[in-house]
Image (spheres, rainbow, N blue to C red):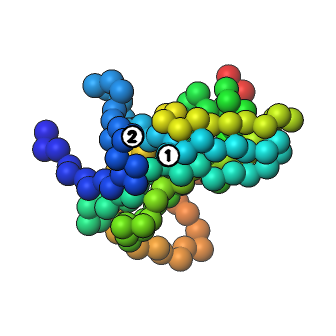
Amino acid sequence: MKKLQVKIKRFDRTLPLPTKQTSGAACFDLYARVDTKIQPKSVGYIPLNVAIEAPKEHWVLLAARSSLHKRGLLPANGIGIVDEDFSGDGDEFQLIVYNFTDELVTIERNARIAQAMVIPTLDVKIIDAKKLNRPNRGGIGSTGVN
């Protein structure tokens, strides 16, 4: 398998490069650059110490690590979609989070809190259709709860 080369700039070079934690990991982990406090029931921004130059015709998916909710935080915008052209020298990635607790949440510098994946961009042509050719499924949740 050919490895895709991706340029990553670290703003604080004393923090580690993003890495995959296991050989089967789909994403590489990103680290908080500074201690960040997020007030209760508020949105906060956590600098992730990287600017990423996605290869041509690729984009970066930015998501929370699965343990982030244990800290009382959820991504405020679900996931981050980072376009190929958000790749300048000063374009530091940030995780936008919502503190859903009644307590102040502190994320410590060097905490692994987000993950990123580089994905090829598909060139999609949108077709305005008056009718689709597949049968209806019955709406969201139509296959049951379990």
Q: Say which quadrant the N terminus sits in.
A: top left
Horizontal side, residue 109 vs residue 137: left or right: left
Residue 58 is situated, as x and y percent measured from the top left of the image, at 32, 60
Q: Cα distance, mark 1 to mark 2?
A: 8 Å
Q: Residues within 10 Å of mark 2 (few under 14, many from 20)?
A: some
Residue 123 occupies which quadrant of the picture?
bottom left
Question: In the rendered image, which residue does mark 2 sit on?
Answer: 15
Front-most of 81 and 97? 97
Horizontal side, residue 109 vs residue 141: left or right: left
Residue 73 occupies which quadrant of the picture?
top right
Residue at coordinates 35% horizontally, 38% vertically from top-left? Answer: 16
Front-most of 92 and 131? 92
Residue 59 is situated, as x and y percent measured from the top left of the image, at 38, 59
- CB within 8 Å, label 1 to label 2: yes
Q: In the orientation shown, which residue stands out farthest toward the bottom?
A: 128
Question: In the rendered image, which residue does mark 1 sit on?
Answer: 33
Q: Say which quadrant the C terminus sits in.
A: top right
Front-most of 97 and 121? 97
The answer to whether one can see residue 113 in this image is no
Residue at coordinates 56% horizontally, 30% vertically from top-left? Answer: 66
Residue 94 is situated, as x and y percent measured from the top left of the image, at 54, 54
Q: Residues within 10 Å of mark 1 (few under 14, many from 20)?
A: many
